[in-house]
Image (spheres, rainbow, N blue to C red):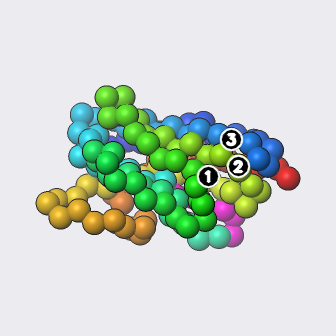
Amino acid sequence: QVQLVESGGGLVQAGGSLRLSCAASGRTFSNYEMGWFRQAPGKEREFVAAISGSGRITYYADFVKGRFTISRDNAKNTVYLQMNSLQPEDTAVYYCAARSYGLGYRETRRGDEYDYWGQGTQVTVSS
């Protein structure tokens, strides 16, 4: 029902910035919470950030420490992840994901509660 396409990854030096984008198909984008996850080689997938359908609620993994900002533009069916002060440990494939929910909203950091996933975009940070 939903197709997600990430872009904006690349190679940067430590301390640099990248802005990831995730473009979604369909006309019901605002009904979905959007999340960013990442996975480094040999590591498990981990939650990075999420934003509610309206954009009024955002929450982050502790390791972000104010460096990353998630946002969305529902008119453009796009969610963003602004990543500043990047460090080598941020190197990973970053995935965009979407989940729907009913009347009861709650925050989640679980990947298995997301319904749709993009193909991922590689972020590499050199030291």
Does 116 appear in magenta?
no
Identify the residue position indicated by label 3 in the image. Answer: 17
Q: CA distance from mark 2 to mark 1?
A: 6 Å
Q: x, y (%) of residue 125? A: 76, 49
Residue depicted at x 70% and y 49%: 85
Indicate the amino acid at tag 1: Arg
Question: Which residue sits at x=27%, y=45%?
Answer: 54
Separation of marks 3 and 1 at Cα, in angstroms: 10 Å
> Is 69 or 35 nearer to us in this picture?
69
Amino acid tagged 3: Ser
User: Considering depth in this image, is 50 or 114 the residue closer to the camera?
Assistant: 50
Q: Badges 3 and 2: C-beta atoms under 8 Å apart?
A: yes
Q: Which stretch did the figure color magenta?
A: 37-42
Q: Which of the two labelled residues, at mark 3 and mark 1, occupies the earlier sequence position?
A: 3
The spot of residue 109 in percent (x, y) is: 42, 67
Instruction: State the image coordinates of residue 11 (x, y, percent, origin top left).
Output: 75, 41
Question: Is there CB contact under 8 Å for labels 2 and 1?
Answer: yes
Residue drawn at x 18%, y 64% as measured from the top left:
104
In which quadrant of the rendered view does residue 23 lie?
A: top left
Residue 75: x %, y % from top left: 31, 29
Residue 40 located left or right of residue 46: right
Q: Residues within 10 Å of mark 2 (few under 14, many from 20)?
A: some
* Furthest-right residue in this view: 127
Residue lying furthest left? 103
Q: In the rendered structure, which amino acid carries the disc numbered 2?
A: Ser
Residue 85: which numbered mark, if any?
2
User: Crowding at label 1, few (<14), some or many (≥20) Cα neighbours within 10 Å?
Assistant: few
Near mark 3 (Cα within 10 A), the count class, few <14, some 14-19 or many ≥20, is some
